[in-house]
Structure formats: structure tokens, C-alpha cells
Image (tube, rainbow, N blue to C red):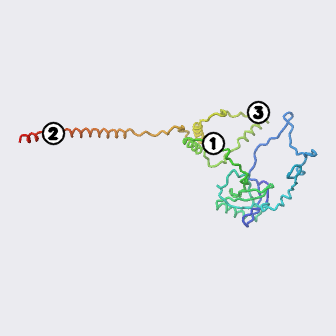
Amino acid sequence: MPRPLWTGAISFGLVTIPIKVVSATENHSISFHQYHREDMGRIRTRKVCELDGEVLTQEEIGKGYEIAKDRTVPVTDEELDRMPLPTAKAIEIVAFVDADSIDPVRISDSYYLAVDGQVAAKPYTLLRRALERSDKVAVAKFAWHNRERLGLLRVREDAIVLHSMRWPDEIRSPESLAPRETELDEDEIERAVQLTDSMALDGISGFRDRYREALEELIAAKSEGKPLPAAPGGEEEEPGKVMDLMAALNASVKAAKETRGEDATVHEMTPGKPRTRKKAASAPRKTTAGKTAGRKTAAKKTASASGKSAAKKQPARKTAARKRTAS
């Protein structure tokens, strides 16, 4: 376990939990030195006093706040430690909230809180169980690195994690960065949703730092005098080129399915064109036509029958008229 960065206690109501703060993350980035191109001499940064030009060690350097030009108020570490802050040596829990209510952009560095002595084991476990059962996270205040900070306490496996957070007024508004309202075709949105489904994973633990691996290969090749690794080929997009969004989405869905070993058949959709609907079967139309023809035939038959009936009745009327004339 790395050495503690800070020691103090968690203030949980009237419960005090002695803890040690250790970093929860490691930096695996490869660092470079600056050097002189001509003779490979190392370039170093030195802290020089602007009054006498002397190079100073860290022990000779103090803190100060410039309140006016040529007037600086010195402040010592001891004075900072003696400031009357309730959070100077305690992580004071001030509220419990739903985890979904915390904007991730406010979360900064992460630290593990380890118990400091056996006496802290029971209250530490009590707080952890309370967080787990309530399904909440704790919002806390603590003073560190010469300022009071806002923190978030949550459970990770069997440990309590402290995330330092930014204050609300430290978050810039993205309003001016949002693009102007753009019209999207419904098919484009549906294809984008299909792409998210095809790229879905259960977790992100399998990701690796490809850049660091490539950088290690580059350094190894140069140190051994071997040829440098070749850059992967690929077509570069022209800057400012108008993208065929639907074509890019169709290709992305297909590539994602091939990567996952799924059926890569993609039924392409074209924005702006109505979806192809199945045509109605021809049988119903024939039936309808048959019914229409049937109606016409029936009408003809009715008309023919009416004509014959009228023809039969006409001679009978003439005979009756003759009889009346004779009498």
C-alpha cells in the first residue's frame, strides 16, 4: 500500500472514524526529459531568486500572497494548519444524496480511505454498510492543500472511496459550446441507437493504454538500433469534407458486428426516403374486383328481368283497353 497522503478522521454525525488517505490511482505515463539537441545536455528547471540571482532549494522557499505591487504577505505552513476550520483534520459528512444526482464533470481525483488503527474498524464498517443499504453517497467537506474542498464518499468493493469534487462555481457552462439546432432524420437516430447496441459492453476493465505500449516499442527500437515500428495505414479524411452520415453509421454498425463475431448483414437505411412497406397481396384486389363485377352482372340481370316483366304486362294492358272500347 502506498504511503498515506493525509491523516485525519471522518466525522459522521457524532461518530468519529480515524482514517488514512491513500491514492486510489497510479500514473503509468512515460515521462520525457528536456535536452539540448546539439550535445544532448540535460535541461533542468531551477528556482532562482530575482533579487540576488541565487538558486534556491525547496527548504528556502516559502509561501506568500501579493496584496499590492511590491507588497507580499508571507504565510507559513504552521499558520495554515492552525486556521479555525472544522474540516482541517476531518472529512465532515454534511449530506447523503442519490449517486445519480452528482454530475460526473465535478468529480476530480480519487482516494481510498483506510482505517487508522483497530478502534476505527467498527465505525468504518458501520458507515460502509449504511452507504450500501441506503444506496446513497455521502457529500463531505475537507481541508487539503491549503483550501477547503468538497468531497464524495462511496463504497468500492469493501473500501470507502473519497472523490474530491469541484465547487459549483468552478464548472463552466457549456451553453455557448452547444451546436445550433440541427435537423436529424429518424432513420439516422435509429441507426445510431443500433450502433450503441452493437458496441455495448458489460464493463471497461479490458481496455489498455495503446499509446503507452506503442511508445515503449518506439523507445525500445531506438535504443536497440532497430527500425521504427511502421504507422498503421489508413485513409485520412479531408478537413471540411461533408460526411455522409448515414453511410458512416451503416459502415460503423457493420464493423462493430464483425468485431464481435456477429452476423454483419446490415439492412441499409437511406435518410429522407420513406421505408419500404409490403405491398398488399393481389388476391384481395381480385376479390374486390370480382365483387364489383358481380354487382354489375347482378344489375344487368335485374334490368333484363325488369324489361321482360314490363314487356309481358304491356300486351295485357292493350287487351283490357280493347274490351272496354267494344262494350
What is the number of the mark on residue 180? 1
Q: Amino acid at mark 1?
A: Arg
In x, y percent, where is residue 278? 45, 40
Q: CA distance from mark 2 to mark 1?
A: 86 Å
* Residue denoted by label 3: 226
Q: Secondary structure at mark 1?
A: loop
In x, y percent, where is residue 250? 57, 38
Displayed quadrant of residue 8: bottom right
Q: Looking at the picture, tell me which residue is in the foreground, 225 or 178.
A: 178
* Residue denoted by label 2: 314
* 194 to the left or right of 54: left
In x, y percent, where is residue 115? 75, 61
Q: Is residue 31 visible?
A: yes
Report the residue at 73% width, 39% height from top.
Answer: 214
Query: Circles 2 and 1: CB distance less than 8 Å?
Result: no
Query: Circles 2 and 3: CB distance less than 8 Å?
Result: no
Q: Residues within 10 Å of mark 3 (few under 14, many from 20)?
A: few
Report the residue at 46% width, 40% height from top.
Answer: 277
Q: Amino acid at mark 2?
A: Gln
Displayed quadrant of residue 229: top right
Question: As displayed, is residue 60 above or below residue 320?
Answer: below
